Image (spheres, rainbow, N blue to C red):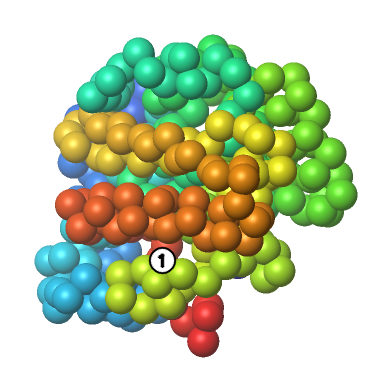
């Protein structure tokens, strides 16, 4: 599933320059009028979110829509500022030492379009290289801004646009080098890589690739959720998913996916405004 990239290079650069002059709180409160404007003009997103809240058994009010838009705006801002000034952020863990141990070796990390996932490379607490598998469709201007920040990241991108064979080789090389490979679990770029499971009461399509790779390469599998809880503060929850290598691949993958989606549902119900799949999620199956 490919979705339109939101945000423009000039607006992001403007926000970042304002941050450098006035500080983070100015930007945080600036997102109120920005989000209100966005909520008023983005009718297609409003329709998709109305359906999302219906799956939660909730009727979406305009305030809920505005708050959802504000959460999106803040996490978008944090995507860039965490790269420039990661020490200004607080990431809260129930077990802060466990990620250090997990990510010191080859690991498949399952991410989701939820909350502060884009800041996840700064919340892993690991110095190991993290390879994020994604479509490198980012506008050149936005990529340039990230490069201008001068933040020396251990994050790399495995570009899905290079084709399945090239991507598979890159993933295999990264895991062989004992690095972390992060893959989105709630969106598959290839229709053949989907698996259908019930999610929030209706069948939906998820990406089976991270679970399949973990099974084939017998690599530890971890699902990460990064929730916005305050000004420059995120709560991180993760689960280690045991893949049963003794079972048939299709059964083992489905069981692992269900563990992931069950946790995802639990997190969504606690933080409903942090769902960032801003399109007709269930319509993909239809």
Up-down relation of residue 109 to residue 188 (above or below): above
Which residue lies at the image location 56% right of the left edge and 32% below the top edge?
Answer: 220
Q: Quadrant of residue 99?
A: top left
Dot 1, how many residues are within 10 Å of its Cα: few (below 14), some (14-19), or many (20+)? some
Q: Quadrant of the N terminus?
A: bottom right
Up-down relation of residue 85 to residue 19 (above or below): above
Residue 258 is situated, as x and y percent measured from the top left of the image, at 43, 58
Which residue lies at the image location 31% right of the left edge and 32% below the top edge?
Answer: 236
Helix, strand or loop at mark 1: loop
Toward the viewer: 141 or 217? 217
Toward the viewer: 196 or 190? 196
Q: Can you identify the residue that label 1 sits on? A: 278
Residue 69 is situated, as x and y percent measured from the top left of the image, at 28, 59
Residue 82 is situated, as x and y percent measured from the top left of the image, at 41, 26
Toward the viewer: 168 or 114? 168
Q: Quadrant of residue 237?
A: top left
């Amino acid at each position: 599933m490919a979705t339109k990239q939101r945000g423009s290079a000039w607006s992001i650069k403007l926000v970042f320059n304002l941050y450098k002059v006035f500080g983070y709180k100015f930007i945080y409160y600036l997102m109120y009028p920005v989000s209100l404007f966005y909520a008023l003009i983005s009718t297609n997103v409003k329709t998709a979110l109305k359906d999302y809240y219906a799956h939660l058994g909730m009727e979406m009010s305009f305030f809920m829509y505005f708050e959802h838009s504000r959460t999106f705006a803040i996490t978008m801002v944090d995507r860039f500022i965490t790269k420039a000034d990661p020490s200004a952020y607080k990431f809260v863990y129930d077990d802060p030492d466990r990620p250090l141990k997990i990510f010191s070796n080859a690991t498949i990390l399952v991410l989701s379009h939820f909350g502060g996932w884009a800041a996840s490379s700064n919340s892993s607490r690991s110095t190991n290289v993290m390879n994020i598998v994604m479509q490198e469709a980012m506008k050149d201007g936005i990529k340039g801004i990230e490069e201008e920040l001068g933040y020396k990241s251990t994050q790399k991108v495995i570009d899905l646009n290079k084709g399945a064979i090239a991507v598979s080789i890159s993933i295999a090389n990264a895991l062989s080098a004992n690095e972390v490979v992060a893959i989105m679990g709630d969106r598959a770029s290839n229709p053949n890589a989907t698996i259908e499971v019930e999610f929030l009461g209706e069948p939906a399509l998820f990406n089976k690739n991270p679970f399949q790779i973990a099974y084939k390469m017998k690599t530890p599998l971890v699902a990460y959720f990064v929730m916005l809880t305050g000004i420059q503060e995120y709560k991180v929850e993760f689960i280690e998913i045991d893949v049963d290598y003794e079972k048939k691949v299709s059964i083992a993958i489905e069981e692992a996916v269900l563990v992931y989606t069950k946790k995802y549902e639990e997190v969504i119900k606690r933080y409903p405004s942090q769902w960032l799949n801003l399109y007709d999620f269930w319509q993909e199956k239809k």
